[in-house]
Image: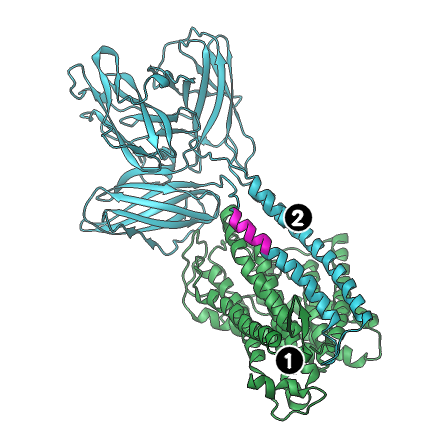
Amino acid sequence: MKLKLLSVCMAVAALPLLAHVGSPDVFFEGNAGPYRLLITIRPPQAVPGVAEIEIRSATPDVRQIHIVPLRLGYKGAQFSPIADSATPSHDDPQFYTGNLWLMQTGSWQVQVDVDGAQGPGRVSVPVPALATKIAGMQKAVAGTLIFLGLVLCFGLVSIAGAAVRDAMLEPGKQPDAARLRRSRAVMVITAVLVCAALYFGNSWWSSDASFYSRNIYKPLQLKPSVVDGNRLVLELQNPGWLNRSTDDLVPDHNHLMHLYVIHVPEMDLVWHLHPERGTDGNFEQHLPDMPAGHYALYGDVVHAIGIGETATGEIDVPAIAGTPLMGDDAGGSGPPVAASPARTVSPLPNGYRMVWERGDGKLRARQPQEFRFRLEDAQGKPATDMELYMGMLGHAAFVSTDRSVFAHVHPSGSVPMPAIALTQPDNPHAGHMMMESGLPAEAMFPWGFPKAGQYRIFVQMKRAGEISTGVFDAAVEP
Amino acid sequence: MSSLATGVERTTAETPVSQPHVPWYIWCSVAAVTFAIVGTHWDISWHRSIGRDTFWTPAHIAIHLCGVLAGISCGYLVLSTTFNPLSPLRDCSVWLWGFRGPLGAFIAAWGGIAMITSAPFDNWWHDAYGLDVKILSPPHMVLALGIFAVHAGALILILGQMNRATGELHDHLRTMFLYIGGMILVILTIVQMEITQRALMHQAHFYRLLALTAPPVLAGVARASKFKWAATTVAGVYFGMVFLIGRILPLFPAEPKLGPVYHQLHQFTPPEFPMLLIVPAFVLDLIWQRTKGWGTLKQAMVSGVAFVTVFAIVQWPFATFLSSPAARNWFFGSKYFGYYVSEASILARWGFLPLEKGADLWQEAGLAVLTAMITTWLGLQWGNWMQRIRR
């Protein structure tokens, strides 16, 4: 047991990856009936575990919020446990917090019921419950357990010795030499048995830990190659995790994969592409013109149960004479990250520009916020000919410059659209905007930086049939 | 202190009993054991019915009370015996790490430390591997070991007194000794609860598992108590306790606070109807009454065969009955399931896992009998040793 304690303290598996890379928290902005809510769900790192829920209401007359976890996509009969009442903040009555147990690995939804002056409202937020790491043991806990374990082991040996030496003596009698010898022999035998028990316990612990480690999420990998000069072929590699397969992918915004190709380490070039899946299971994409260099690949896919994953890969490519971008494919450029520590304005062709309404405050890690971007014309006025880009006002990708974080975010948040659709089976347009005209020139993205560091933000909005890509930078403090 | 001076200690060979009564610390230990059993069954029911708990649920408080009461009684016994040179227990105590006290007090104290150790261990386990919604996990076994040691400590504490006492006091202590034996059987069946469910009762492996735990308790307590119906009494205590808990718990409302909820319930989910261990225990009592002249090994071999055979004869058809519509009521309790039991589960369909086939069946059946023989022999040896306990 002691060896195990030490080994657990020293060696801890850490795979902080989820549907996005390094950004496991779920951000969602939507309506619960008449109430506009920004919901943040921080899933547990171990399952079963506790998810932390934060809800901010943009509508001021909310009286009470109840939250309850339900399996998402479960086919059998399912009943609702008793809902928890979210706790309003003393400082901010529109801010509520709560905790919910997610008891099984898989796809869940947090059902949020709001009661207020405008009557009841409900919204459900999909959330994956995936074990991502095995927590280490703090030194104080390990020390305490080792001490108590030693007391128990030596105590047991001593009790066995006392049982043989003294326990059978008539009152007042002292043990003779033979009894003392027998006592010592029993203590040795007991010590051996204690060692055997510790060995068995250690094996059991190792077995349980090994079983649990098989539940630790293992992300999909992309094995890229370029053939025929400009055709990118992506083999989706499944490292084996539970019963996951890659033949159950469903379209998100009509595409099975949303691929971000980013020139690294400069991050000065980005493409948002949509490879098609061939009959051999591989994804293929005709590349546009690209300079030679090293590129990071982030491919977002969604499983039928509503869990999204980001498959990652890297590739070195020669200079590519490619084909023009078509359909929803788009690309953009900006200065290298090192040269733009705090970039909030991104120039675009024809005098247009994209502006990040960043505000003056510091950007902090683990703080949910709305990232607001506006497309302006040459006169600095909001663009008037806006169009939906794949059913949304915009798409944003947040990438840390050390590439440990990647998140593809929509105005509704970080949740994949097919997952939202599962929570609203009667709504064929769940999560998507239905307006086609009179669209605002602003797009807001609810998200939060998972950790401090330097980030690059790529924002794409569509106007007059063209997709504009804004490039921004952010320095995030702890 | 006055109880020490006027109680059991003067029932030693040197002094006749003037006012025979059971000392308070024995009652304290018996109460601790009872709280542990009630609390543990209540806690398991809580997790099957409500799911979410805190440190301060009534069930947890009952389990904590076990440690508190054991700590008070054992702490008092050890400290008063060690530091009071006039303590009447001093002459009938054992020595350990500079302390003196009855052997049972040290065993129970060891159990208390094990229970304390399990708390941070279990807490870390949940952080590392997620909440373990099962009984059989390493930290839970440390807790179970602790509770078992508190039981064993109480047993030895009573035994030390009982073996020195005579007359009415001896009979009182023997009754308590048998009660604690029954409680030990309850705690062992709790440890095996997950792997001895009704759906498994038509497998030979089920009888092998029970052969591992029931015979040593029945044999050890019977041999140590020298009471002719000891095994029957111990199994009766087990039956009565589990039956009562099982009938009382569903009278109280409960609703799941964790999901997913696959089975809607509105009351506490009780443990399954107690196993009919009382029947083989009765047969074992008869055997041991008629084989007093036999050696321990021969007794164990006959007893092992008898235990497995008789238990299978009564439990197998009774399990069939428990799975029938006639048992789906409050009395037999077969209608109750945990909230997490889906309608597709074999439990919810009142089914049985299939009996082993061919060589596997014979191997499991043979191992069940062999296990019962070995554990009965160990139990009888343990009983022989306990007969000689004086301190």
Locate the C terminus of chain A by quadrant: top left
Residue type beneath disc 2: Ser
Q: Which mark is residue A203?
A: 2
- Looking at the picture, tell me which residue is in the foreground, A246 or B18: B18
* Residue A134 higher or lower than B54, as above or below: above
- The reply to whether discs 2 and 1 touch (Cβ–Cβ < 8 Å) is no
- Residue in the image at 71% along x and 78% along y: B390
B220 above or below A449?
A: below
Please tell me the colour of chain A. Answer: cyan
Look at the image and give the residue range highlighted in magenta.
A139-147
Q: Which of the two residues, A49 or B89, is positioned nearer the viewer here?
A: B89
Display colour for chain B: green
Q: Find residue B327 and report its horizontal and vertical position in percent.
A: 54, 69
Report the disc number at residue B89.
1
Residue under the image location 81 percent in, 78 percent down: B291
Please state which of residues A104 and B77 is positioned toward the viewer in this rendering.
B77
Kindly tell me whether residue B4 is visible in this rendering: yes
Report the amino acid beneath label 1: Leu
Magenta stretch, main secondary structure, is helix
